[in-house]
Image (spheres, grey):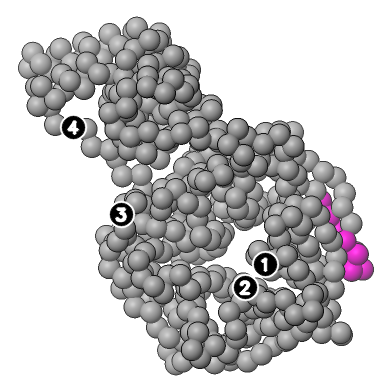
């Protein structure tokens, strides 16, 4: 009893010393509140040191458990990151002298750590940062073969490009042939429990070079389907010319990523990036995110009102999707340094332009960026879906690879459930592609496609979770 009273008095004293008002909600932090010039140690591995007090700032370095640091100052805001509540601290690494910001959940006073170890107080367990359904744990799903498509290895996407109400699996040839590639769309003929077959809906030559990804956009806010082709330097927008059976060019910009959406539920918006002329210290490129209304009157593409987000971000991927179901799309960006990934920033349309809604971090294998990222309906609810590793597996070599769904709350992007597909070290993972088909069906609307080099074809499979 005396020991409990002592710990309670110590917690209150720390709160008083930090200047927290009694009118605020009483919060007892696991490592206590650290003060200026306090000596502390890092309590986790691969903990990031950033240039500022949020996940939006770039990474200076990463340190491991036991690294000694000196506290320089504490940010005023008590924040919650993946269920962990604490302050950001500006710290100095005692050995290297590097100064930066670290989230307080991974810091503890040296004296406090020594006392905890001496009196054998059990260590505080970190909360699991997502709600994981045990039925979707380490067990791998059954992959039902539902069909095959004879196509060479290509860039693959999906969408109703021909506008007939049936989404296609779309291939863009990986190899250039006289400054052009072949674009082919396949529609399913039969479905259900029987093996599906696919027929060729269209095939055409596309005069496209420098391609890194393609995506098809449809919706009530568009007059006709549009296809976005992203490259290393430039991105293009095309539409399908049915009479000539060819892609017709509409727009080009010097942005490595483009996305389309209705940010206000009415107008069509083009979302693009403008490179910041001043790179980060480690060479990481940052971009200003811009949005502009556009029209496609009589097949002409015209840009109108432009707005932007005031702060440059190291954008890796860009998705536009209505995550909260209010009829207006959000802009979802994966951000990270030159050699790192794992952060997500969500922007929305505010009264004064683009404003940040959420800034969140996610675990990825060896801090690499996510392989793929989509907005999609899962069990009839809008979700952000990442094709990545099991968050519980972290950096373990034998962890599972699959779909991680996340929902947008009022102030957080909450990782909800992980659907395993295969083990990370499976050889098939190097050739496997995931494809979303927004057909409105219940469950996880994804297909898994494996390329068979010997037969020069894609095997289309549906993951079945028991």
Q: Is residue 129 above or below residue 156?
A: above
Q: Name the mark on residue 155.
A: 2
C-alpha separation, residue under disc 3 versus residue under disc 2: 29 Å
**Do we see residue 331 in this rendering?**
yes
C-alpha separation, residue under disc 1 versus residue under disc 2: 7 Å
Quarter of the N terminus within the rendering = top left
Depth check: 103 or 265 in front? Answer: 103
Instruction: Determine contact: label 3, label 2, CB under 8 Å.
Output: no
Could you classify mark 4 by the number of other residues whose Cα lies within 10 Å: few (under 14), some (14-19), or many (20 or more)? few
Residue under the point 34% across and 51% down: 395
Q: Which residue is mark 1?
A: 214
Could you classify mark 1 by the number of other residues whose Cα lies within 10 Å: few (under 14), some (14-19), or many (20 or more)? many
Secondary-structure class at tag 2: strand
Secondary-structure class at tag 4: loop
Percent from the top left, x then y, of residue 249? 85, 69
Q: Which is in the foreground here, disc 1 or disc 3?
A: 3
Q: Which residue is mark 3?
A: 396
Mark 1 or mark 4: which comes first in sequence? 4
Residue under the point 65% across and 42% down: 285
Residue under the point 14% across and 31% down: 122
In the image, residue 411 lies in the stretch drawn in magenta: no
Q: Which residues are magenta?
A: 293-301
Q: Name the mark on residue 123.
A: 4
Mark 1 or mark 2: which comes first in sequence? 2
Residue under the point 28% across and 63% down: 138
Question: Residue most toward the front?
Answer: 96
């Amino acid at each position: 009893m005396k020991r409990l009273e002592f710990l309670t008095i110590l917690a209150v004293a720390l709160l008083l010393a930090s200047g927290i008002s009694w009118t605020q909600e009483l919060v007892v932090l696991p490592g206590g509140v650290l003060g200026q010039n306090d000596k502390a140690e890092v309590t986790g591995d691969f903990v990031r040191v950033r240039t500022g007090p949020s996940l939006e700032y770039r990474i200076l370095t990463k340190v491991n458990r036991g690294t000694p640091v000196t506290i320089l100052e504490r940010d005023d805001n008590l924040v919650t990151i993946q269920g962990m509540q604490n302050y950001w601290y500006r710290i100095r690494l005692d050995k290297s002298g590097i100064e930066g910001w670290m989230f307080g959940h991974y810091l503890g006073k040296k004296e406090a750590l020594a006392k905890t170890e001496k009196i054998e107080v059990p260590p505080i367990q970190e909360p699991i940062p997502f709600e994981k359904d045990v039925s979707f744990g380490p067990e791998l799903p059954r992959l039902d073969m539902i069909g095959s498509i004879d196509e060479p290895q290509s860039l693959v996407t999906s969408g109703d490009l021909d506008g007939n109400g049936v989404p296609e699996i779309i291939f863009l040839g990986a190899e250039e042939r006289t400054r052009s590639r072949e674009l082919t769309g396949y529609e399913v003929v039969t479905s259900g429990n029987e093996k599906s077959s696919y027929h060729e809906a269209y095939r055409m030559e596309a005069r496209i070079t420098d391609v890194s990804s393609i995506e098809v956009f449809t919706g009530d806010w568009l007059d006709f389907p549009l296809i976005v082709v992203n490259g290393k330097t430039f991105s293009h927008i095309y539409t399908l010319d049915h009479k000539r059976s060819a892609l017709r060019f509409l727009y080009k910009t010097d942005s490595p990523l483009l996305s389309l959406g209705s940010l206000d539920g009415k107008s069509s918006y083009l979302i693009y990036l403008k490179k910041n002329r001043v790179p980060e210290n480690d060479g990481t490129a940052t971009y200003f995110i811009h949005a502009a209304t556009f029209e496609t009157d009589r097949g002409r593409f015209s840009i109108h009102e432009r707005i932007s987000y005031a702060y440059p971000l190291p954008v890796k991927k860009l998705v536009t999707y209505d995550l909260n179901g209010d009829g207006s799309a959000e802009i979802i960006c994966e951000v990270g340094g030159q050699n790192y990934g794992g952060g997500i920033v969500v922007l929305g349309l505010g009264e004064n332009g683009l404003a940040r809604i959420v800034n969140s971090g996610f675990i990825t294998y060896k801090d690499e960026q996510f392989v793929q990222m989509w907005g999609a309906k899962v069990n009839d609810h809008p979700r952000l879906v990442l094709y990545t590793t099991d968050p519980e597996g972290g950096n373990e070599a034998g962890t599972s690879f699959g779909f991680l769904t996340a929902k947008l709350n009022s102030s957080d992007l909450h990782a909800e459930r992980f659907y395993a597909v295969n083990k990370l070290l499976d050889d098939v993972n190097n050739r496997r592609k995931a494809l979303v088909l927004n057909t409105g069906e219940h469950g996880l609307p994804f297909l898994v496609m494996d390329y068979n080099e010997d037969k020069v074809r894609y095997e289309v499979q549906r993951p079945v979770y028991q």
